[in-house]
Image (cartoon, rainbow, N blue to C red):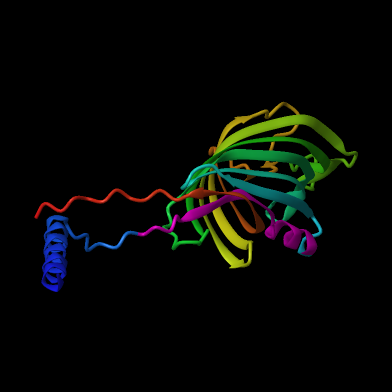
Amino acid sequence: MLRYFISLFFGMLFTLGISQESKPIDLQSKDTIQRTEKYGLRVGFDLSRPILSFVDDNYTGLEFVGDYRLKDKLYIAAEIGNEERTQTEDLDGIDLYNYTTNGSYIKLGVDHNTYKNWFGEQNLVTIGGRLAFSSFSQTLNNFRIYETNRDFNEETFFQLGTEPQEFSGRTAAWLEFVLGYKARLFGNLYGGVSIRLAYLVSNSDEEGFPNLWIPGFNKVTDGSNFGVGYNYTISYFLPLYKKAKKKKKEIPNSN
């Protein structure tokens, strides 16, 4: 009887050994942890405009910024702001005219993140574009007329009037190419910077007084529709939900 059980035991071991050898052994460990990415809204404001408002008595401005993560690398972005600037144009040190521009603007577009984050990071190095629109007014505070005939007027300039003249209902639209960077400072707080190359598409330059400066676009240059801008932002990320991160497809080994 004992010999029978011993023979049966070794027979079972032999059968199990054969069945184990027939199954392929997977030497590659599988990652069973599902990795997720945070999606949500980031809101903040431009730091440069309040600082400039503090140091320059002729400027007041504020801009709010925001972006929403739509896909893994794609973000919907927007900026909205208000600016007022008083400037003086001169010729050879003589003031020609003084004017004030006041208005609001909005910029809407997308950003594509080109930065490859480590797992859990939310830093951005972006390339994007904006469609921007501004509504504003120009107020001519005072001006001088240039007189070329010295026989009748010893002074080459004379004061014509100091009564302010307002030109309201002005509008402008432009396109922006945006290069930006946002990095996490701590927690959900982010610091960022962007450089913007703008192209003026439309400008309601009506008679009376030209649009020399446009809120959100900056200075208008004679003979050119291009402009340059920037901002330095501080923003807070509000995570709304998590989404599983897609795994890259493995390339089969041809060997």
Quarter that holds the C terminus: bottom left
Residue located at (89% from left, 42% from top): 162
Q: Where residue 189 sits in the image (x, y, percent)?
A: 64, 63
Give the percent coordinates (x, y) of residue 177: 50, 44
User: Looking at the picture, how far across and down is residue 67, in whole percent?
Assistant: 61, 47
Q: Which residue, as the protein is rendered here, is positioned at the far right?
A: 163
- Towards the viewer: 33 or 45: 33
Q: Nearer the viewer, residue 94 or 253?
A: 253
Which span of residues is magenta-colored?
31-54
In the picture provided, is 118 more to the left or to the right than 78?
A: left
The residue drawn where x is 15% and y is 57% is: 19
In the rendered image, the vertical position of residue 192 relative to residue 240, given as above or below = below
Would you say residue 53 is visible in this rendering? Answer: yes
Relative height, residue 115 to residue 112 (above, below): below
In the image, residue 48 lies in the stretch drawn in magenta:
yes
Quick check: 15 left or right of 248?
A: left
Image point 25% across, 62% down: which residue?
A: 28
